[in-house]
Amino acid sequence: MRCTSKGGRTGRTAHLPQIFPLQSAGVRLKALVWILRPGRHGPQVLLLERPDRRGGGEHPVTGKADPGESAAACASREALEETGLRGDLIDLRLAHRYRGRKGDFEEHAFLLRVPADAAPTLSDEHVRHRWASRAEARAVVEWDAHKQALDLAFEGF
């Protein structure tokens, strides 16, 4: 697996990693991973459905970094743990901060490019999956930062 940066991005929070240390006091590092594969009618994105006990809805791969783990390492690990998929990891150079029920988080966005025949093996964190078009995914994603990352993932695919 290789990780590259999507260059040429300005006006976003892309420079947060240089300004704020990883896992700075009181802020947990997270990764958000949109998984895309080639499809007959254009790229398809993997949507993972969470069970009701975990809030339900369809989402990308997300997860918290282990102590000392980089955002890219977290993204690779979480994608593998939640879906069993590996591929080319692309740093989308987008990060955002938010306050959740369990504290403050800084989430970094990635694209994972997988082959057309990629088939996920879901962890117990999800009950179903589907491959969707960009429009279908945008219709179900609730958070603006996730929509922005989705758009960047399709642009980077």
Image (cartoon, grey):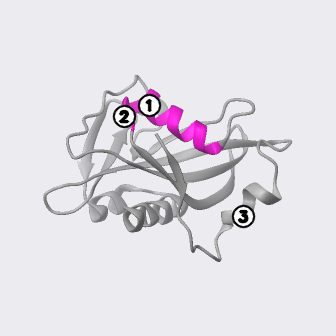
Looking at marks 3 and 2 on the same chain, the residue that comes earlier in the sequence is marked by 3
Q: Which residue is drawn at 46% across and 65% down?
A: 152
Residue located farthest toward the top when viewing the structure as drawn: 124
Q: Position of residue 41 (x, y in %)?
A: 15, 62
Can the viewer see residue 51 in this picture? no
Q: Position of residue 68 (x, y in %)?
A: 75, 33
Q: Residue 85 carries which label?
A: 2
Magenta part of the chain: 71-86
Q: What residue type is disc 3 on?
A: His
Observer-nearest residue: 55 or 47?
A: 47
Looking at marks 3 and 1 on the same chain, the residue that comes earlier in the sequence is marked by 3
Q: Residue at x 56, y 68 (%)?
A: 7
**What residue is disc 3 on?**
15
Q: Is residue 59 magenta?
A: no
Q: Position of residue 11 (x, y in %)?
A: 65, 77
**What residue is disc 1 on?**
80
Q: What residue type is disc 2 on?
A: Leu
How much space separates mark 3 and mark 2, taking CA atoms? 28 Å
